[in-house]
Amino acid sequence: MDKKLEKLLPLVQKPARYIGGELNSVVKDKNAVDVRYAFCFPDSYEIGMSHLGMKILYAVANAREDTWCERVFAPWPDMEDVMRQNGIPLYALESGDPIKDFDILGFTLQYELCFTNVLNMLDLAGLPLRAADRKGLSPIVMGGGPCVCNAEPIAPFFDLFSIGEGEELNSEIIDLYKKHKALGSDKETFLREAAQIPGVYVPSLYDISYNGDGTVAAITPKDGAPATVTKRIVKDLDAVPYPDTFVVPFIDVVHDRVTHEIFRGCIRGCRFCQACFLNRPIREKKPETINEQCKTLCKNTGYDEISLCSLSSSDYTRIEDLLSLLLDWTPEQKINVALPSLRVDNFSEALLNKLKSVRRSGLTFAPEAGTQRMRDVINKNVTEEEMIETANIAFAGGYSAVKLYFMLGLPTETDEDVEGIGLLAKKVVDAYYTNPDKPKGRGVTVSVSCASFVPKPFTPFQWEPQATAEALGHKQQYLKEHLPSKKISVSFHDIKVSALEAVFARGDRRLADVLELAWKRGCKFDGWGEFFKYDVWMECFDEIGLSPAFYANRARSYDEILPWDHLNYGIPKSYLIKESEKARRAETTQNCREKCAGCGANRLLGGKCDV
């Protein structure tokens, strides 16, 4: 570690965030590699170190002898102040070297409100913010993650984006960079060739024009760039490399455990859910593969908990087989197995009996809406009867704490639908007290968490307006006034944070000017309540001359060109329109295992779809 930095670390909270040297971190001879890659997570160390995607791509890159991948996180404001006051540039944890000297800076964009942190990290590194102002081949600034499905608001700051899954694509980008570095190519030559790699989006090779009303008039590729960039997927999860070890932090992080991905995709098709549509088609790992990889990870990290990760764990077709394999060895080693993301409609007694073999905590379910009509609109395909039956199974199995997730502001929502949230929670409370097999001597805890609906790209609701702040405030107050039981606690997401999220989720490139101005005026860590500066953001919109309501609260027509229309995530717009129309009629669509709805995603695997 740099001696100057070592003397300054006692001045900040949690200095272990900034020292590196953790168990299983990868250290190489920088003179023996061809490519130095900084994996940048634009949030705190505790958040970034919990992210499975970072662990996977860190391992994949470091498995290459010619590449050294190091980790970089957004320094907390106290550390940033120390760095700026003492002339310390942003550095990578493994080597302590400034990242401005690296070949590739790869940012994962998990959340729209991390965008200002990206700019802050580039500035801390001593680099120009805009891609056009960074001359020379290195460093290439690239982005990946779910937010790149509409990267337009942040596009001017990036050289390229990795669209879809990165295990194979990132290696192809590294190969091409290594080639052009050896040739002494300029950045423009590299980017033109990179744009020919399937899944690579180079924003500088696309011109955007606008209509008089502010909508997009055309997205025009140039210099041989493809008209449409199709996402990359990994076809065989059993064959793709998976880490045999994780870096073990010195301090507590959000998810401090072995996390194992059991399958990708989702069979459900909830119409608000971007993750469902971005991650199709469905691909499962074999239980035997998962079991062996979990054994290895526990051995190499010392962790005593395994979390089985997916969008809907109980939809994994061989979940009971997998739990049987894991429970053959985890109890003896005192290792807990956690199964998040459970579905109400397939939580069986057999599954409960498996879960009873491990440490028990509260159960979490996501009805999302309080009435059946509203659940049909969003295609949740969960009934009140299934909800109560699931609660009774859980209570009879010894559970006494349930957390329920809902959304407010969904399309067509009425006050009756809002009141239904409290009524459904009350029926869960009643189910506990009328259950003869409930835990003895304990009361029930039902926690209701309500997020504000944010319309997202590549969902059937991408054309819908977000409810205004005034409307969402009314809904929150209405629910609080109509809670039917003191056994129910309710919490809400910040309306203003959700409003800004909606702006950037559906925004265009003109927002880059707002983003840069907001950063210059001190906006960063916008997803953290103590740092969020809503009034500053609104001043920046006014000064640039753009309206947040134009992006967040405006309904869009099906024939409007959307800022992300040149990207293809495997689901044609015609299917999303069909689902949008069914939502207006409160009609449901069966899940993928009951009947193929023809979403088109299986074509990415070379298969057929019923379209």
Image (cartoon, grey):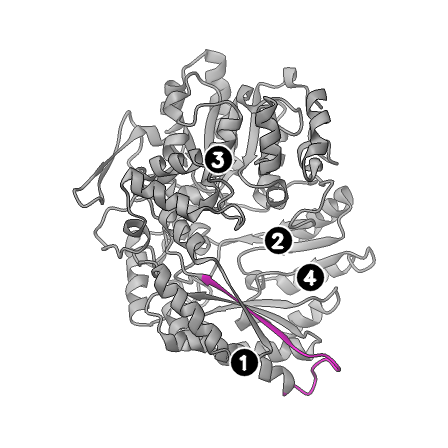
Region rendered in magenta: 434-451
Nearer to us of marks 2 and 1 is 1
**Is label 2 in contact with label 3 (beta carbons under 8 Å)?**
no
Q: Which residue does the numbered mark 2 point to in the structure image?
A: 286
Label 2 vs 3, first from the N-terminus = 3
Q: Which of the numbered marks, if any, corresponds to residue 118?
A: 3
Which of marks 1 and 3 precedes in the sequence?
A: 3
State yes or no: residue 443 in magenta. yes
Evaluate whether residue 108 shows in this view: yes
Q: Amino acid at mark 4?
A: Leu
Q: SS for tag 3? A: helix
Q: Which residue is mark 1?
A: 426
Comparing labels 2 and 3, the label whose residue is closer to the camera: 3
Mark number displayed over residue 323: 4
The reply to whether the C-beta atoms of the residues labelled 2 and 1 are less than 8 Å apart is no
Give the mark nearest the N terminus, 3 or 4: 3
Discs 3/4, front: 3
Q: Residues within 10 Å of mark 1 (few under 14, many from 20)?
A: some
**On the rendered image, what quadrant is the N terminus found in?**
top right
